[in-house]
Amino acid sequence: MIRLASIFWLIPALLVLARIAMLLRDRRDLQGAFTFPSLTLFRREGSIRTALSFLPFLLEIIGTLLLIVALARPQRVLRSAANDRFGIDIVIALDASGSMAAEDFRPRNRFAVAKEIISDFIDRRQDDRIGIVTFGVRAATRVPITYDHDAAQAILSRAQVGENGDGTAIGQAIATAINRLKTSQTRSRIIILVTDGVSNSGSIEPITAAALAARLGIKVYTIGVGSRGEVMIPTKVQNPFTGAIETVYRTFRADLDEETLNAIARMTGAEYFRATDPKSFNAVLARIDSLEKSRLAAPKREHIDELYPLPLRLAMVLLTLGWLVGETALMKVAA
């Protein structure tokens, strides 16, 4: 598309054209129908003189019009259609408490398996914005919601068990995820909460946070991870005899508050899932992967090419030629 950025400069152009029309009309009115009484009208010498006498005026008029066009700043505008993307805004809240180091998802622990499966989930959601929150005794945003999945994957890969303290602040995790989503304009906003324990930290109760999510129209899908019964968890201890740091395995009983996780999901119109092994964990995220999608409109792109240099250069050339033709010896020929 071609447009003029300063269209008001066309007003002088119209005035110049009007003045030219008036001059031509006045010149025609001053001449009779038969200016020359003989065939000398058609003599070659007379035609050359007439053309040369009119040439400077013609060059200056065209040059002036081109100069006005340049001042009006013609532009070529290239617009790309809106790149509509269909997806949802998702914040993944991942439990990083000490119990996630339990190795019932052999040969790796719960946290390592969770990171791997979540990473695969992110790869499948190319049209979604993804955010990541990790939590323990406190919750922290690791990745604000973004289309930059590579950055999200890199940060997720560096997450470690215990980086947020040894505790389980489920309510705080939901509240932190809500803060990332509350300004989102998409119709579908969800939180995927992954935990293996009972809320025992934080100043916000899980049900209170769930009620806030429900009021804002945010769904909270909850996933309880870990096998039932007793599990082994590695613990770093110092050998009292050698002073060396050693890894010992201790047995503890899995304590998952499924009732609260179920209540959180129901309050927000979502679902609760139990993942007792890597296969079932992957199946849970595959189910969430089939959620409804809503439109995310990416901004339109516009590229502008300035076209005024060409008419400006032509105007300078024609105005200079007009001056030279009128002031040099060439006009003596027409005299």
Image (cartoon, grey):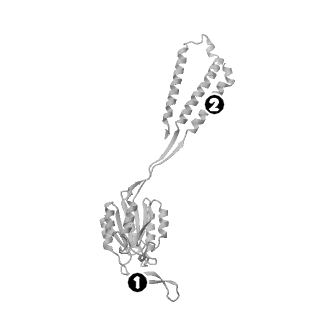
Secondary structure beneath label 2: helix
- As drawn, is 314 to the left or to the right of 219? right
Q: Position of residue 232 (x, y in %)?
A: 42, 82
Q: Would you place residue 146 above or below residue 28 in this image?
A: below
Q: Which residue type carries mark 1?
A: Thr
Residue found at x 50% / y 28%:
14
Residue found at the far front of this picture: 203
Image quarter for residue 208?
Answer: bottom left
Binning the other alpha carbons within 10 Å of mark 1 as few (below 14), some (14 to 19) or many (20 upward) gives: few
Q: Position of residue 308 (x, y in %)?
A: 55, 38
Q: Are marks 1 and 2 in contact (CB under 8 Å)?
A: no
Image quarter for residue 31?
Answer: top right
- As drawn, is 177 to the left or to the right of 239? left
Find disc 1 in the rendering and name its residue.
251
Secondary structure beneath label 1: strand
Q: Would you place residue 272 above or below residue 14 in this image?
A: below
Find disc 2 in the rendering and name its residue.
320
Q: CA distance from mark 1 to mark 2?
A: 95 Å
Residue found at x 39% / y 70%:
194
Residue found at the far bottom of this picture: 241
Q: Nearer the viewer, residue 190 or 205?
A: 205
- As drawn, is 321 to the left or to the right of 192? right
Q: Quadrant of the C terminus?
A: top right
Q: Position of residue 158 (x, y in %)?
A: 49, 70
Q: Which residue type carries mark 2?
A: Thr
Q: Would you place residue 314 above or below residue 305 in this image?
A: above
